[in-house]
Each structure stands twice: as C-alpha cells, then as structure tokens.
Image: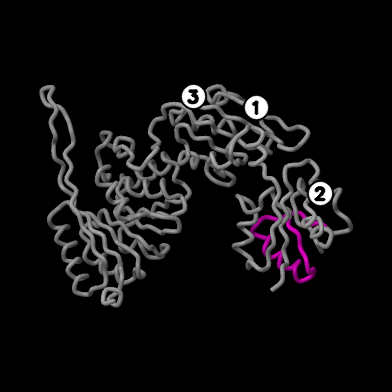
C-alpha cells in the first residue's frame, strides 16, 4: 500500500514557509484540500495544482477516497501540528496508517508558549473546539496554566466566567490572537474584568488561563468532599457513596484510559463523577432509575464538567443495560433487589480480565455478595478481594470531640480470570 494522503502543517505564518520535504510533496500533488484561510497562506507556493475547499468531516472521507482514485498524491492542509488536536487524528481513524504521511510545522500552541516564555511541558492543553464549555471545569486547578483551543462558544469572557464561578477569582486570562500574522495581538486581563466585557476577539486565537485563587467545589485530588455534590437534601447527605468508601472503590476499580465503566445504581453520582473526572479518556455510564436521583446526577455531571465522558442512563438494571457499550469494569452500588440475577447475567457476558466491584451495607446484600463469592470459588474463574470499611466521623458533643461510627460497608472485587488461568 502506497502513501496517498500527505498532511502538511502550515505553521503560524501569514505566508506559509514549508520544509523542503513538504514543498516537494505539494509540488507533486494532484489536488490540494484546505480551508479558505489555509489555501490563502500557500497561494504563493502553488503551481497549477487544483485546490478543493475542505468539506465537512462527514463528507471528507468520501471525497478523499474519490481523489485518490484519480490522483496518485493528495494533499490535506492542516494546522501546525496535524496530530495534536488536529485533523491528523481524524484521518488516522478513517484511513490505514500506510496511506498517510505527516509534515508538521510550528503550532499555534508552540508559538503562544514562546511568546509568553512558557515551557510546553509545564502547561495543560485543553481543546474546547466543538466541545461543551463546561469541560473546562475538569482542568481548573490552583496554580495550573491552561492553554485553551476555543470555538465561538468558548469565548474569553465565557472562560473568565467559569473561573469566577469556580472560585478562582485571582486568575488572569491571556488572549493570543492571530499568531504569526501582521495583526498579531497578545492581551492580558484579570478574569473579574474580562467576564464583564462586551468586546469581540479575533476568532483565530488561543486563550491562556493562569489559574489563581482559593477555588471552591472543584477538586485538586481524588476524594471530592461529600457536601460538594448536589443531592437534593442537606449538604453531605443523600444518595451518594461517602468519600472514605468512595476512595476505596476508586482504588479497587483502578480506572484507566480506554476503560468502559458501568456504574449501576449510581444514585446522585459521586462514584461515576470521580471516575469520569480523573480519567478523561475512560467512558463512564451511570445507570439510575429514580427520577429525583437522576436529576441530581445530571446536575452533578454539569457541575463538575464531566460532560464529554459521562453518560446518564435512565432505567432499571438489567433491562436498561441492553444496547449499552460493553464494559470492562462494572461497579454496582445498588440493585433494588435484582443483585443475584444481575451478577449472574453480567458475569457470563463479561470478557476475561474484566472486573465487577460492589458494595454492601445490609446483611441481605452482603449475603448475596458472599453467595456470589462462593460460586466463583467453586468455578475457580475469578480473582477475589474483599474488605470492610468502617469509618467514625468526628463531631462535637458538649463542646467535646467525639467520633460517631457510620455503618460499615463491605466491598468486593471479582476479576474474571477463567478456570484455566487459576489452574496454571
């Protein structure tokens, strides 16, 4: 298979300056795809090659395939680094690797870092292009510097408002517009001032947030305070898994990039929220049937900005699980009496090396989990771990410190190994 699509990054110059290799590819191209702005930046480098406006992504694959049938070499123009929040990742998902070649240039993010004297490895890059602005809440953290790729919805004013709402009132936002162009402009604003401004900024800009201030409900480390979740009742109360137990559940699940995790009986969503918040490249599906808890779950999803990778599923398991993306990790926080049937069904369908984690407070639910444990021991098809978490929370009585015990919670983790693995 020969290379058919050459992806050329254009850098941040008003007139593109290509490497020798990229210029050679451009000279030999049968057709050049690019946006109006991109085509304008290489106009002085083009010969007789036909150009084609870049279509919507839904149409791009078909047009590129048609072009490759007609020409031995097709060029797609891209941002400075096509494989860093650029079109290169999309192309890799739709074409085989041997068909693609990439020619990177200096990106707008690199240009911003050098203009401001920032080391790229010391900043956190977030793309809000085509994504909900609330996603920024997963990255706002004291003393972080964020580089934001934006669209028409994630304006500098909107980002400043997010900083204020999260309690980072001392933050500053730097708008770096038209980098590499003659009209390049870099402006710094306190977020409190910027949030009130009505001015418009050049659409071709990168926003930089220097996050400062005490902050509010957004966490800096796993273990979100119970009172920061909306539960519809007194702060820190209601249908959530409390922090001390939740941290143990997170540890047992060990969420990582690429996981698909079901949270069955999610309640108001404390476990699902933390799974999605700390593992942005995992997908979390929170299943809940009670209307009031679902409302709280959705409020918390928006509140903590996990709008990209947390999906709320309205329904009762196991019926509500039909058609969902297959999981490799499952947490069962509640089952409304369906636990024995649910466990049997889930275990049969779960791939090898996947896991189920569950918790029990009542003696009835504990007995169900222990019964499942005995089944797994007999079948020798699981790695087993269990622990009991007993926490006493401090409070005062007659101005004296006392510790009041919470009900102990039993946790179980089953990793599906198969009988052959255990025999070995």
Numbered tag placed on residue 187 in the rendering: 1
| Helix, strand or loop under label 3 | loop
Residue 386 image position (x, y, % from top left)? 21, 58
Q: Which quadrant would residue 155 be assigned to in this image? A: top right
390, 64: nearer the viewer: 390
Could you give the CA–CA distance between mark 1 and mark 2, rounded to whole angstroms?
28 Å
Q: Which residues are magenta?
A: 51-76
For residue 224, above or below residue 378? above
| Helix, strand or loop under label 1 | strand
* Sequence-first disc among 2 and 3: 2
Q: At x 59% / y 45%, what residue is drawn?
A: 129
Q: Which residue has dot 2 on it?
A: 42
Q: At x 13% / y 36%, what residue is drawn?
A: 404
220, 39: nearer the viewer: 220
Badge 2: residue crowd in 10 Å (few <14, some 14–19, many ≥20): some
Residue 215 image position (x, y, % from top left)? 42, 29
421, 265: nearer the viewer: 421
């Amino acid at each position: 298979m020969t290379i058919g699509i050459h992806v050329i990054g254009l850098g941040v110059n008003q007139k593109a300056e290509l490497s020798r290799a990229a210029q050679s590819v451009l000279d030999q191209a049968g057709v050049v795809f690019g946006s109006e702005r991109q085509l304008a930046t290489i106009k002085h480098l083009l010969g007789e090659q036909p150009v084609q406006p870049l279509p919507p992504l839904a149409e791009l694959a078909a047009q590129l395939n048609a072009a490759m049938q007609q020409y031995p070499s097709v060029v797609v123009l891209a941002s400075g680094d096509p494989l860093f929040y650029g079109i290169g990742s999309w192309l890799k998902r739709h074409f085989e690797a041997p068909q693609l070649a990439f020619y990177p240039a200096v990106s707008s993010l690199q240009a911003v870092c050098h203009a401001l004297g920032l080391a790229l490895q010391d900043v956190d890059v977030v793309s809000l292009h085509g994504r909900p602005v609330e996603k920024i809440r997963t990255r706002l953290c004291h003393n972080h510097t964020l580089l934001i790729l934006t669209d028409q919805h994630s304006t500098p004013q909107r980002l400043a408002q997010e900083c204020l709402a999260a309690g980072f009132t001392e933050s500053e936002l730097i708008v770096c517009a038209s980098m590499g162009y003659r009209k390049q402009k870099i402006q710094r604003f306190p977020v409190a001032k910027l949030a009130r401004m009505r001015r418009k900024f050049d659409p071709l800009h990168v926003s930089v947030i220097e996050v400062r201030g005490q902050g509010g409900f957004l966490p800096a480390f796993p273990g979100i305070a119970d009172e920061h979740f909306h539960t519809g009742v007194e702060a820190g109360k209601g249908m959530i898994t409390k922090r001390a137990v939740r941290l143990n559940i997170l540890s047992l699940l060990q969420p990582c990039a690429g996981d698909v995790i079901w949270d069955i009986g999610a309640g108001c969503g404390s476990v699902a929220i933390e799974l999605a918040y700390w593992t942005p490249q995992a997908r979390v599906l929170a299943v809940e049937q009670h209307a009031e808890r679902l409302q709280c779950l959705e409020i918390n999803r928006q509140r903590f900005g996990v709008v990209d990778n947390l999906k709320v599923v309205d329904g009762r398991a196991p019926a509500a699980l039909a058609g969902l993306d297959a999981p490799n990790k499952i947490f069962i926080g509640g089952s409304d009496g369906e636990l024995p049937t649910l466990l049997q069904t889930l275990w049969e369908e779960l791939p090898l090396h996947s896991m189920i984690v569950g918790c029990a407070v009542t003696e009835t639910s504990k007995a169900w989990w222990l019964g499942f444990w005995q089944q797994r021991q007999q079948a020798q098809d699981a790695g087993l771990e269990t622990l009991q978490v007993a926490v006493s929370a401090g409070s005062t009585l007659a101005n004296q410190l006392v510790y009041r015990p919470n009900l102990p919670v039993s946790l179980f983790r089953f990793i599906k190994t198969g009988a052959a693995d255990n025999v070995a």
